[in-house]
Amino acid sequence: MTELTSSAGVRIVSLNDTTLDGQHSLQGVYLESDNGEVGVALVARDKELPRLVHWGRALAHPRHVLHLYEAQRPQRVSGELDDTTWPSILPTQAEAWIGAKRLDIRRGTRELFLNFELQEITTTLIDPAQGDGLDAELDPGAAGGVQVNVIARDSAQNIAVNWRLQMLPGGLIRQSARLVNNEPMASGENNGADNLEISKVELGWPLPSRASEVLTTTGHHLHERRAQRQKLSMSRIEKVAMAGRPDFDFSLLLAAGTPGFSFEEGEVYVEHLGWSGNSVMAAEKLPYCEPQISGAELLYGGEVSLEPGDTYATPWLYGSYGNGLNEASKRYHRFVRAAHPCFAQVQRPVLLNTWEAVYFEHSYATLAALADKAADAGVERFVVDDGWFMHRRSDNAGLGDWSVDPAVWPEGEHSLKALADHVHAKGMQFGLWFEPEMINPDSDTARAHPEWILRASASNQPGSELGRLPMQGRNQQVIDLTNPAAYEHVFNAMDTLVSQLHIDYIKWDHNKLVTEPISPYSGRPAVHEQTRAVYSIFQGLKKNHPGLEIESCSSGGGRIDLGMLRFADRVWVSDCVDPVEREENQRWDSVIVPPEILGEHIGKSPADSTKRATSLSLRAAMAFFGHLGVEWNLLTVPAEQLEQLAVWVDAYKALRPLFSTGMVVHSGPDDSDEPAAYVDGVVAQDGSKAVYRFTQLTASRSYPAEPVRLPGLNPRSLYRVSLLPASVADMPEKGNGQSDLLWAVGGGARGGAAGARGGAAGAGASSKSAVSEGEVSEVSSKSAVSEGEVSEVSSASPVSPAFSGSVTLDGEALSRYGIRPPSLHPAQAVLFVVDEVEE
C-alpha cells in the first residue's frame, strides 16, 4: 500500500493484492477528502477496466478496499451472458453492459464495439498550473487535489483512452476521459476512412440501490430552475440540451437520493456536467445492477472526427455526496470559490445595470444623470447594457458591428468614453454589454461577410452555395467563431474597446438558440468548437486585461455551468427580476453556484416580466444574498424609496463579506409541512454569524406561520437573534400580526448573554466602512448600530420597538424547533441576523 497526501490534506492510497482465491490480481485506489467526510474507491481485476466500488462517507479501513470487488461482483444468472451486467468506468457490451449506449463511436458509418484492456493505473497530486487538461490554461479550483489516471487500449480498433478521476479539497469529485485515434493511415494521404467519429462518451457514477428518487430541474425563459422529482424505477431518466447551451429546461443538477431527501436530510448524490454546449444527464437502473447517474456532451454526426493521432476529451462530470443538499452543495461552492479566490478578499461591488432602466433609449445626459443617482444610492459599478453600438436602436439590427455609434454617442463631451470617465470619476467601475456570439442579418458585418454565419446546410468547398439560414430568434443568427477571421473580428473589437474605454466589466449575453449549426468554414456542425472558441475569448480578454470581470448571461439563466464558471466571474440568474419568481430559481442555482457569483437585482414594481407589484423590502430581501445589483430607473424613483434603497445597499455592504465566504443553507418547503415558507441563509464557516431570509411566498397553511428552523448553526453554541432593521421598517404594511412578537420587542437582548463574537448584528454600515467577515467597524448615520444590538435606524426606515429587540437561544434549539417569524402577508420577507455570543 502506498499513499500520497496533498498540500490540502486530500489522501490517495494505492493497493495491490490478489483475489481471495489467489487466481487474479487486483489493483485498487482509494481517495479521501481533506475533511474526512467523503471517500471514493475503485478496483480493477487483471486487465479489466476498474469499477467504482464505493462513493460516500470515508472508510475507516481503506486497506480492505480491494475486496469490495468480490463483495459486489454479481453472480451469473439464467437468461443472460456469461457475466452479469456490472458497469465499469466505461461500460460496453464487451463487459455485458446492455443499458443505454454509453459510447457512440464509429469509423465512417460503421459502429465500433469496443473492448478496452487495462494498461496501467497511476496516482498523482494535481498541479493547477498545468491547467485542467481541457480548455482551462490554469486550474486553481483543483489546487490541493489528487488524481488517479487509468490508461486502457482497444488494440483491435486502435483506440486508447486516458480516464481521470480527481478528488478535490472539500470532497467534490470529477471525472473526464480522453480518447485517442491510434489508427495508422492506410496511405500517405488521409481520405477520412481512418477517422474516428465521436457522437457520445457518457461517464457515470454508480449509486447504492437506496438512492431511488431523482430530482432534476426544468423551466423556461423568465421561469428557470424549477425542481421536479420522480421515482427511479427500472428505466432511464434523462435531461437533454440541444440548443447550443444548457438552456432553461436542461437540469443544472441531477440529484439521486433516499426517498424524500431534502436540503437538510437524506443521503444524496448530486452530479453536474461542466459544459456549455449540447449535453445530456441521466439516471438509469437495470434489473441486473445498481443505479447509475451519468452525463455527456452530445455531438452531431461529423462534429468531432478524429484523424489518426487526434484526441477528444469529455467535459468534466462532477459529483458531490452529502446528507442533505446543503452538505452536497458546500463542496461545489468550495471548488468555485477556489477558482475565484479574489472574491473572498475584494468585496463584490454593488452594480446598476441600465437595461430595464432605459432599454434602448441611450443618451449621455440620461445615463450620466442615472450614474449620479446610482452613486448616491451606494452603487459601485455602472453597466451600460444593449443599445450603444452601430445601428442599435432596437433588437432588429446592429449585432456584429462592435463599434460605438456616433449617432448616439458623438465624439467629445457626450461620447461613450466621456460617460465612462464620468462613471470612473464618481468612484464607480464601468461595464459594457456585448453579445459576441450573435449577429443580426441587418448589420454591416453580415452584409460584408455572409460566410461568417452558421447555417442549416453549408459546404466549405470554394464557390459552393452558402445554404439556408436557420430559423431566427430575436432577429438574430449565430456568428461562426470557429472561423478564424470571424473570431479575430469579435475578439479584436472587444479587446480594443476594453482598452479605449477602460472597461472594468463585461456583461456577455447569448440570446439565440444555436440550432442547425453548420459552419461554412469547416462544413461541419460547430457547437463543440464554437463553445471552445467562447472559452478562448474569455481567457484571452482576461489575460490581456488583468482584473477584468466578465458576466455570463444567456437570455437570463440559459447558460449556468461549471464549464463557463472556470472563466466567468458572475452569472445572470434570470431575465425576470420579480422576487416571487426569483425565490425558486435563485435557490436551485445556489446548490451549485455560491451566492457571490449569482447576479440578483432589485428591480421596479410592477416587474416588466410579470406585471406583478411587490414591496421594495421583498425585492431587496430577495436580491440580498447574491451579488447585489439594481435594475431600475432611479431617475423616476421617489426620494423616500431612494433613501430606503440606500439603507438596503448599506446593510448589504456590511454583510457581504459573509456572503462571499459563508456556507449556504436552505430549509423548507421540503423540510417542513409548510409549502408557503422558505428559509434561505448563509452561515460563517466557523459558525459565529449567520443571516437568514424568511419568505412568506403565499398564504401559509399554518396561521400564524410556524416557527422556522435555522440550519447550519453550531448546536453547542449560544446565539443572539435579531431582525435586520431594513427588513422590518415597513412592517405596518406587510405584517398581519395583531399582538407583539414577544422575542422581538425592543428593550434589550433576552437571556443576558455577553457581546457577540462577530461584532454588530448587521445593520447598514457606511459604504466607506472597513468590513471584515462578521464585523462592522464604521456605521453610517442612516443605521447606527451598537455592539451586538441593532438600536437605531435611519429616519428613512424607522423600526417599531415591536421589532427592534433580540433573543438569545441555544443553537440546537434554533436548528431543531426554530424561532417564530413575524406574521406576514403573502409575498413578503424578513431577515434574521444571528450572532454567536458568550454565556
Image (spheres, helix red, strand yellow):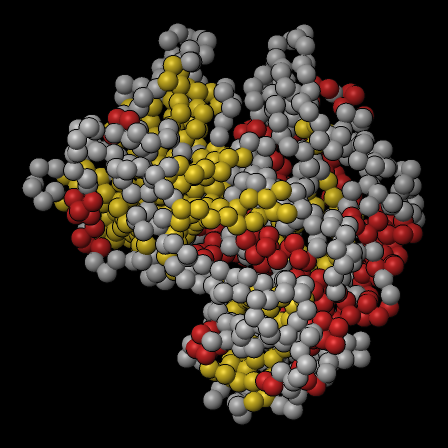
Q: Residue at x 73, y 59 (%)?
A: 602
**From the viewer's perspective, is 396 left or right of 189?**
right
Q: Residue at x 50, y 72 (%)?
A: 709
Between 748 and 361, the one nearer to me in the picture? 748
For residue 47, which quarter of the picture? top left
Residue 530 percent location from the top left of the image: 59, 30
Q: How many marks?
A: 0
Residue 576 percent location from the top left of the image: 69, 50
Q: Residue at x 21, y 50 (%)?
A: 65
Q: Residue at x 77, y 52 (%)?
A: 611
Between 50 and 633, the one nearer to me in the picture? 633
**From the viewer's perspective, is 68 left or right of 325?**
left
Between 166 and 458, the one nearer to me in the picture? 458
> Is 759 located above or below residue 339 in the figure?
below
**From the viewer's perspective, is 617 left or right of 16?**
right
Q: Is residue 766 visible?
A: no
Q: Is residue 454 visible?
A: yes
Residue 548 percent location from the top left of the image: 66, 49
| Outermost left residue | 21
Residue 38 percent location from the top left of the image: 34, 57
